Image (cartoon, rainbow, N blue to C red):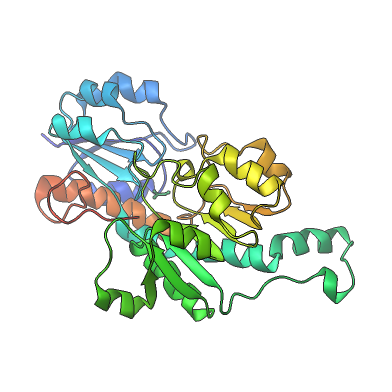
């Protein structure tokens, strides 16, 4: 009998079918984007594998209902939507898609930095409305060259961002739970700082860390108050790394220069206050949304499932092996 796979979201369906040709695959019919939580809960007991979107809640109730479930392959590098502790207790493997997200997410972070420092979205808006403000002094942005980019979370995305920022002449500092080797620091050209030093000296502070109980609200009111008044905050990782209410106050009172956000604290719903502010650039969680990146994520997630059943590398997140990746 073929193992049964349930896929919560229908993108690149033909790719899934090709890679999972030795499986019995169920996914939403074309025209329907995704299954609801209730729909998945009702049938999960029949499936051996679940391929879940990054925002689909794979909680204790669902995992326990998955009586035959052996693997949850997340279509994401993040896995904060999955109760990994319960999955591990139940002997269910959790896998993610670390490789394909790296370059596209670093592109968006770099794009937000450029957009904020050079005011690109504001200029675009004004230009279209025909109210381009004449006069050099009214249109000044800030150069990237010589500015300090502080990267919180120097995993693969952090490193890819560092490469891009270096090419723009920025200096790089970082903070990680585990410091990199000196050799790697030299290769990247990044200086290790304590979290407090990083926050208080960066001209641009970019968050590229995984969301865990330790990193939840790592940027809170107190840490925002340590940032330089002309510094920018960039978040392309996960919204709850930042206390969004405190961020709104800091931005409203111009205690920092601006924020470029691709992710939001409240389930990707943007706080209405953020929408009113001029010193923000906001994108709707599109860090990994390139045709190439998304296709590779689909390939990677379904290959995780195929390899789990038929042998080969699986990017496990609840493994003692060192396959786990920082975002
Ligand atoms: C996207 O945010 C991901 O985790 O892949």
Query: Measuring 73% from the left and 43% from the top, which residue is drawn there?
Result: 276
**Placement of 221 over or under 150, stated as above or below:** above
Q: Position of residue 305 (x, y in %)?
A: 20, 46
Foreground residue among 325 and 315 = 325
Query: Measuring 70% from the left and 54% from the top, which residue is drawn there?
Result: 279
Question: Quarter holding the C terminus?
Answer: bottom left
Horizontal placement of 83 versus 319: left or right?
right
Horizontal placement of 41 versus 245: left or right?
left
Query: Measuring 64% from the left and 64% from the top, which residue is drawn there?
Result: 115
Query: Does residue 299 appear anywhere in the picture?
Result: yes
Query: How many discs mark residues in the rendered view?
Result: 0
Query: Measuring 52% from the left and 40% from the top, which residue is drawn there?
Result: 243
Question: Quarter holding the N terminus?
Answer: top left
**Placement of 327 over or under 40, stated as above or below:** below
Q: Quadrant of residue 179?
A: bottom left
Q: Position of residue 53 (x, y in %)?
A: 38, 40
């Amino acid at each position: 009998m073929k193992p049964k796979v349930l896929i919560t979201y229908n993108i690149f369906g033909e790719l899934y079918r090709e890679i999972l040709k030795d499986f019995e695959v169920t996914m939403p019919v074309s025209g329907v984007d995704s299954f609801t939580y209730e729909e998945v809960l009702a049938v999960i007991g029949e499936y051996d594998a679940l391929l879940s979107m990054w925002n689909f809640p794979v909680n204790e109730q669902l995992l326990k209902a998955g009586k035959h479930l052996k693997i949850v392959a997340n279509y994401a590098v993040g896995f904060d939507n999955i109760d990994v502790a319960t999955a591990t207790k139940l002997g269910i493997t959790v896998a993610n898609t670390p490789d394909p997200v790296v370059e596209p997410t670093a592109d968006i972070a770099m794009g937000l930095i450029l957009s904020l420092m050079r005011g690109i979205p504001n200029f675009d808006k004004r230009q279209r409305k025909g109210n381009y403000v004449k006069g050099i002094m009214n249109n000044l942005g800030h150069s990237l060259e010589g500015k300090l980019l502080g990267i919180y979370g120097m995993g693969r995305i952090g490193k890819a961002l560092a490469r891009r920022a270096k090419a723009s002449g920025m200096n790089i500092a970082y903070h990680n739970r585990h410091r990199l080797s000196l050799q790697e620091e030299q290769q990247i050209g990044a200086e290790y700082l304590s979290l407090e030093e990083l926050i208080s000296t960066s001209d641009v502070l970019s968050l590229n860390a995984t969301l865990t109980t330790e990193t939840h609200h790592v940027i809170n009111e107190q840490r925002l108050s340590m940032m330089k008044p002309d510094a920018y905050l960039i978040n392309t990782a996960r919204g709850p790394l930042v206390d969004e209410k405190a961020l709104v106050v800091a931005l409203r009172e111009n205690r920092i220069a601006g924020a470029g956000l691709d992710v939001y604290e409240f389930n990707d719903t943007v706080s209405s206050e953020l929408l009113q502010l001029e010193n923000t650039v906001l994108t709707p969680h599109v860090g990994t949304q390139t045709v190439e990146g998304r296709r590779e994520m689909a390939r990677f997630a379904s290959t995780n499932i195929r390899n789990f059943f038929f042998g080969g590398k699986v990017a496990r997140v609840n493994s003692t092996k060192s396959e786990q990746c920082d975002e």
